Amino acid sequence: MRLLLLTGIQEELLPLIPEFRLGFHSVGVYQSGSYPDFFAATTGPGVKKGRQILELLKEIVPDVIVNAGLTGMLLDQSDKPGSPQPGDLLKISSIVDAQNDVIFPLGPHGKTLVTVKQPVFEPYQKAALAREHRAQFCDMEGARLIQLLRNAEDLRDETPIVFCKVVGDLPDHFDLYEHEHLVRSWDRKGFLGRMLVGFKFPGGPLRMRKLLQLKEAAIEGLTAHTTRTVKALLGGADPDTLGSVYAPA
């Protein structure tokens, strides 16, 4: 079985490299050294690499596609017991395209995910999205990826898409995530670079540390859930048993 993993950005894919011994297959595409029929790539935010993804689909013709990534919670649920936290896996019942309000059903039970064009962090913007689309979470790839794959001439009509979506940011983290750009590529910064960012970060190093901890929890959760999903599929599991699945008619 050929499996293709797609994440929106490199940050979501990099932690999976050692687990699956991912090496370069071609420009922008990885292939597993442990599972030769397992491939991985990034779509770019908002599926900016649509043309490259279509070429990749034509080349490998996967039997199953996994879309893994972080999502933003739209409404504050901190007052509810057991409310989702960064790193928690979501069960999604439908994905909505915010631009044209097209709804893609995934299952009878779960949350609604709305796909947006630009990152959304401000609470009032999130509340508006939740109200307009009756959604609980947002991302930038889900609906666009479904539409791209539905139009892929070289993809089998019945190829399922398994969504492994994890909670990233919460509404009450807005004051931290509005400065998230300052800590991007953190692992590639040296000691001096990190010190400079800490001093520049609004509120100081302690607030920056809090943001880094939140991002780390989200990425660790995504890595763990994606690893389990991919290994289950490679082991022969039925995609329909794994939760959030879009199965073309």
Image (spheres, grey):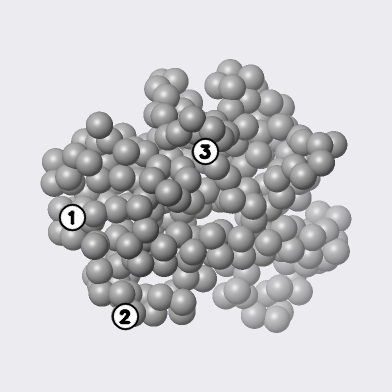
Q: Indicate which disc, 1 or 3, sits on the residue closer to the N terminus.
A: 1
Q: Is residue 34 above or below residue 39?
A: below
Q: Nearer the viewer, residue 57 or 205?
A: 57
Q: Position of residue 107 (x, y in %)?
A: 45, 34
Residue drawn at (65%, 39%) of the image? 73
Which amino acid, by three-letter code, is at mark 3?
Answer: Ile
The amino acid type found where label 2 is placed reads: Gly
Q: Position of residue 198 (x, y in %)?
A: 78, 67
Vertical placement of residue 192 versus 85, above or below: below
Crowdedness of circle 3 by 10 Å Cα count: few (<14), some, many (20+)?
A: many
Which structural element holds mark 3? strand
Residue 72, above or below 53: above
Q: Which type of secondary structure does the marked residue at label 1 adopt?
A: loop
Q: For this view, does 16 lie left or right of residue 218?
A: left
Is there any visible trace of residue 97 in the rendered image? no
Marks 2/1: CA–CA distance: 19 Å
Quadrant housing the C terminus: top left
- Picture residue at 45% right of the left edge, 59% below the top: 229
Residue behind mark 1: 61
Q: Amino acid at mark 1?
A: Val
Q: Residue at the spot x=67%, y=47% of the render?
A: 169
Q: Which residue is mark 2?
A: 33
Label 2 vs 1, first from the N-terminus: 2
Whether the residues at callouts 3 and 2 have beta carbons within 8 Å, the answer is no
Disc assigned to residue 92: 3
Residue 176 % position (x, y): 76, 50
Q: Nearer the viewer, mark 3 or mark 2?
A: 3
The residue tagged with tag 2: helix, strand or loop? loop
